[in-house]
Image (tube, grey):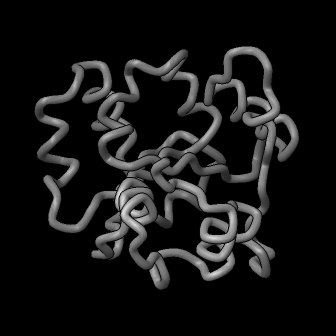
Amino acid sequence: MVRLALNGRPDFFVDEREVMRTDPCYTVDTLSELRAELGAQRPLCLILGGDAFLQLHTWHEWKRLFGLAHIVVLQRAGGLPLGNAMNHADAALQAEYRARLAPSSLALHEAPAGTICVADMPALEISASDIRRRCAAGKNIRYLLPDSVADYINSHELYRTC
């Protein structure tokens, strides 16, 4: 479905390394492999939602991530701003946030890794959970995702209840 969604968008590519792994899969390992393939100077970004970022300190070797990529945190419109949420976050994560927060997204072009950039997501009320619920209820999912993906889900009767 990701391949279908990205069809015709040459700036994106599907990387299957995590799906094909048979051993435990950690983001730090994936980014290490990507960094080795792309070179030390090419900027690389790991995009996370705000909720995932607030749990980053629980990830395997999480501090190494900053040496491998920039962390771009997407905030949902209408949600608690990340800056406010950080007041209740893990102390080590708070320290990294304060030390690495970029004043703008321009910083993502100035270095290959190491900054945290916060960006607002468009105010779209679309979620994977909602799409799965709609499918299970037999509701229309058009306009919530690319037509090619909606067609695939419908033709394969995915997320339907038995």
Q: Is residue 41 left or right of residue 141?
A: right
Residue 85: image quadrant is top left
Q: Is residue 5 visible?
A: no
Whether residue 86 sits left or right of residue 30 in the image: it is: left
Residue 41, given in percent of the width and then of the height, sits at 76, 47
- Horizontal arrangement in the rendering, residue 112 relative to residue 19 (left or right): left
Residue found 68% across the figure and 62% down from its top: 156
Question: Which quarter of the figure has residue 138?
Answer: bottom left
Q: Which quarter of the picture shows residue 17?
A: top right
| 137 to 49, vertically: above or below | below
Quick one: quadrant of the N terminus? bottom right
Res. 161 visible in picture: yes
Seen as rendered, the residue at the extreme right is 37
Residue at 36% from the left image edge and 68% from the top image edge: 126
Q: Residue at x 54, y 16 (%)?
A: 61
Which residue is at the front of the view, 162 or 87? 162
